[in-house]
């Protein structure tokens, strides 16, 4: 349980004596591809490149149905979780104008995941949230955003500059540490890499599995986005049902791109999202629920904490890493590229 030692939970959670439910587990990469069954179903290719984890039912389109019945394996450690989770990729833009995809770090606080995402599901306490229904999906973020949201500490997408190896003394509390979390890419080289956090809303309309913009069926609490530790966060009357807080953590291995001689001549930071966003404000996440039966509800109701949960089963990364999906769009995701896949201009 190495990772517990690395965690320093927000004071509010500690005060609750860990009554909080928090699944935290690794999911290896199943593929890197330019498809997007949530925002651009059926488009081959979709607009920008993604890195995807979870069940092997991931495809250019995915029917609004019980995804856990379509997938036959998962790259996540909970056997019951056949969901899909994905985000844009990060690219390094060298001074000479070429692009190189930034790999992800193995999150060794969790185990030997192959790149991928560390996934969290949190709830303020037992029997306090309603788990998602089969077919549920949602989106968090705004691809077009290039400026802050003025949410202060309550930002729901952020970056943390790791000051050294082993996360530079990582603590939990994503996006709530004004000293270290920024809504835009860090401006100076990060000796330990850069962590992305994407946090989804915690209120649901109780009816719709999806909505045209994949966001309107969910909402933030009335006082704005909240940490899972906020036990009494109040949902708006339009979205009265509290759902688990889904949260992604990705650590980009920017360490081999820290030579400032290769950074843009004007001194600006060199990282861009696969959407062409050089600010990071447009960071976003996509989610397609796919837990088997009531396994997620069970975990949320039984104070499960960390990478295991009584009543659920787990697989090792040796097995999880074997669950992969062939990429559909054949293009170079590894070399030095003269333009971002999809031809996005950096802007
Ligand atoms: C993806 O969809 C295509 C076309 O519908 C289908 O032929 C293929 O088997 C699907 N792949 C997976 C992994 O489900
Ligand atoms: C561009 O710069 C990168 C980083 O310095 C280098 O690896 C690459 O070979 C260069 N490409 C060209 C076409 O000069």
Image: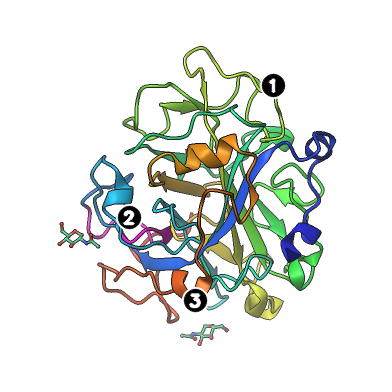
Q: Is residue 231 above or below residue 316?
A: above
The reply to whether the C-beta atoms of the residues labelled 3 and 2 are less than 8 Å apart is no
Dot label at residue 318: 3
Mark closest to the chain's N terminus, 3 or 2 = 2
Q: Is mark 3 within 8 Å of ligand 1?
A: no
Dot label at residue 190: none
Residue extending farthest to the front is: 311
Q: Secondary structure at mark 3?
A: helix
| Residue drawn at (25%, 60%) of the image | 45
Dot label at residue 232: 1
Residue 258 picture quarter:
bottom right
Q: Is residue 14 above or below residue 89?
A: above
* Residue 117 falls inside the magenta stretch: no
> Which quarter shows the N terminus?
bottom right
Residue 175 picture quarter:
top right
| Residue drawn at (55%, 45%) of the image | 146
Q: Position of residue 344 (x, y in %)?
A: 39, 59
Q: Is residue 80 above or below residue 317?
A: above
Nearer the camera: disc 3 or disc 1? 3
How far apart are the alpha carbons under marks 2 and 1?
39 Å
Main SS, magenta region, reads loop
* Residue 44 falls inside the magenta stretch: yes
Horizontally, is 173 left or right of 253 in the view? right
Residue that badge 2 annotates: 47
Viewer-closest of 102 and 189:
102
Q: Position of residue 50 (x, y in %)?
A: 41, 60
Viewer-closest of 124 and 140:
124
Q: Position of residue 281 (x, y in %)?
A: 57, 47
Question: How many residues crowd mark 1 within 10 Å: few (<14), some (14–19), many (20+)?
Answer: few
Segment colored magenta: 43-56
Q: Position of residue 14 (x, y in %)?
A: 82, 40
């Amino acid at each position: 349980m190495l990772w517990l030692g690395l965690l320093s939970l927000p004071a509010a959670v500690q005060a609750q004596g860990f009554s909080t439910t928090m699944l935290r587990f690794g999911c290896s990469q199943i593929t890197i591809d330019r498809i997007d069954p949530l925002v651009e179903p059926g488009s081959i290719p979709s607009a920008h490149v993604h890195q995807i984890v979870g069940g092997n039912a991931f495809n250019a389109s995915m029917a609004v149905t019980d995804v856990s019945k379509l997938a036959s394996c998962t790259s996540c450690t909970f056997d019951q979780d056949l969901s899909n989770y994905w985000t844009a990729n990060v690219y390094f833009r060298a001074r000479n104008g070429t692009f190189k995809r930034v790999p992800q770090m193995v999150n060794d606080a969790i185990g030997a995941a192959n790149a991928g995402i560390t996934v969290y599901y949190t709830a303020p306490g037992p029997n306090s949230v309603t788990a998602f229904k089969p077919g549920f999906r949602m989106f968090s973020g705004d691809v077009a955003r290039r400026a802050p949201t003025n949410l202060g500490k309550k930002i729901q997408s952020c970056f943390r500059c790791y000051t050294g190896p082993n996360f530079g003394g990582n603590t939990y509390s994503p996006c709530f540490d004004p000293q270290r979390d920024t809504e835009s890419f860090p401006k100076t080289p990060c000796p330990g890499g850069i962590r992305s956090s994407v946090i989804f809303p915690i209120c649901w309309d109780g009816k719709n599995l999806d909505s045209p913009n994949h966001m309107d069926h969910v909402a933030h609490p009335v006082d704005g986005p909240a940490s899972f530790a906020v036990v009494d966060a109040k949902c708006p009357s339009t979205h009265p049902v509290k759902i688990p807080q889904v949260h992604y953590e990705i650590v980009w291995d920017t360490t081999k791109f820290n030579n400032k001689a290769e950074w843009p001549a004007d001194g600006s930071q060199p990282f861009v999202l696969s959407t062409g966003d050089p600010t990071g404000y447009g960071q976003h996440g996509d989610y397609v629920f796919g837990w088997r039966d009531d396994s997620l509800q069970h975990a949320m109701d039984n104070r499960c904490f960390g990478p295991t949960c009584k009543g659920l089963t787990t697989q090792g990364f040796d097995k999880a890493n074997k669950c992969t999906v062939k990429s559909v769009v054949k293009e170079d995701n590894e070399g030095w590229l003269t333009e971002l896949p999809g031809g996005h201009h950096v802007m």
